[in-house]
Image (spheres, rainbow, N blue to C red):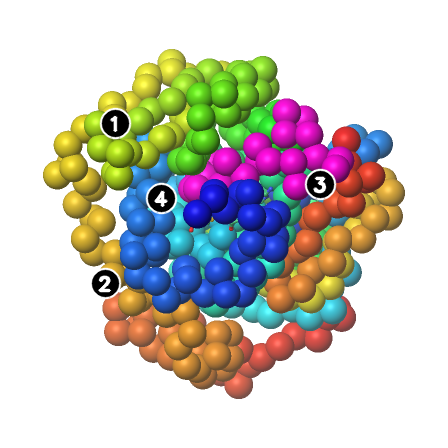
Amino acid sequence: MSRPEYQAPPEFYYNDEEARKYTRNSRIMEVQYQLSERALEILALPEGIKAHILDLGCGSGLSAAAIEEAGHSWVGVDISPSMLDVAKERDLEKGDLILGDLGQGLPFRPGTFDGAISISALQWLCNADKKSHNPVARLKQLFTSLYSCLARGSKAVFQFYPEDDKQVELITTQAMRAGFTGGLLVDYPNSSKAKKVYLVLFTGGIDPVMPKPLVNEHELPSAVSNINRKMKNKPVRGKPAKKSREWILAKKERRRRQGKEVREDTKYTGRKRSGKF
Amino acid sequence: MKLLTHNMLTSRCLKGVTNGYPLKIVANEVKTENVDYNSEFIARVIPKVDWKVLSSTASDFGVSLPEEPPADIESNEDMLRKVHHALLEIEITQGDLICPETGRKFPIKQGIPNMLCNEDEVK
Ligand SMILES: C[S@@+](CC[C@H](N)C(=O)[O-])C[C@H]1O[C@@H](n2cnc3c(N)ncnc32)[C@H](O)[C@@H]1O
């Protein structure tokens, strides 16, 4: 089958049906979650730091789950409302979702994020889905705005599926023009099936040390085998409805059982506020 | 959308806009959520926050913060908890964000701001 990017623009390709695969197809979920963990590993944030991470083309929030699992907060940007709806249903609390087009530039203040990851999304930017689309200009918007909204000394890691060398060159040229240094990291280069390509970008202020690629498949991060257990803790369409009073009470109860500090339940718990103050 | 995200969000993708900050919030529906308190995270995020914008936005949602961050904030647990509440627990679920320079509205639906621009609006 031809590459998804050729079938329809992303906001149409990732419709409700496609988005549901990210909650039902455990193979897809496992792969995307693994890639997110690996991207975070490559990001190599200083030990013990709680960071604020940008997730580009965040989709259904699988990488956000990995980001929270690692103790960080996040903002995810995606162009597909269906994917974002699924992300909204996940039990995530330390981030926000934004409907946006990476090719239009990122709408954030300078220096906002400690790092960025992007899983299986960048190849979409190389397409011209509309007459007015120019991939070079869109990549330029993405990378210049990304450079600006990253804190100095931070990194961005894009796992993507390049179509050919020309596409890699198109992408890296625009990234370098925006001020980044860095390049490609290829995990499992000798396996056509397991091979994964990462674009690793550095902002100024750090020595760009390229991390080592994984070569043998037994080197897969060990946390990976826990994916199913982890994802069970992130119910997607469990009852009761997310954010309902019941849901909040159940969640608080779980937290208490974990020995965490939880506010008392009152008649206000889970109530909507009127928008007026 | 949390106020943390609002504090960082701009309309600078629009043609002709230089800062596009801060976006004005018109909130039609607001919720509060419980988010685990982590003093380290809050202390780390404070230097990145535009405090003036945070304190004026927070006051619109009933949380009063001083105009300047207190000097001892890292050891001031009450203050950190208040900031935690303002940044992470207040959720705007329906409403609009408005570009301060052009008046362009960005709708918020189910907590998700729609920052998509028309092709003729972008740089
Ligand atoms: C293969 S999915 C991966 C989703 C998610 N990162 C994951 O790993 O589960 C690719 C995602 O990229 C998003 N995407 C494609 N083009 C985009 C664009 N121009 N702006 C924002 N998101 C885009 C799609 O909507 C889709 O959710």
Depth check: A185 or A263 in front? A185
- In this picture, residue A48 sits left or right of residue A55: left
Comparing labels 2 and 1, the label whose residue is closer to the camera:
1
| x and y percentages locating residue A200 in the rendered image | 40, 25
Give how far apart the Cα atoms at labels 2 and 3 are.
Answer: 41 Å
Q: Residue at x 47, y 36 (%)?
A: A116
Q: Which stretch appears magenta?
A: A116-137
Under mark 3, the amino acid is Lys
Discs 4, 2 touching: Cβ within 8 Å: no
Sequence-wise first label, 4 or 2: 4
Discs 4, 1 touching: Cβ within 8 Å: no
Mark 2 and mark 1, same subunit?
yes
Q: Which residue is mark 3?
A: A130
- Chain to which the residue tagged by mark 2 belongs: A
- Chain to which the residue tagged by mark 1 belongs: A
Sequence-wise first label, 3 or 1: 3
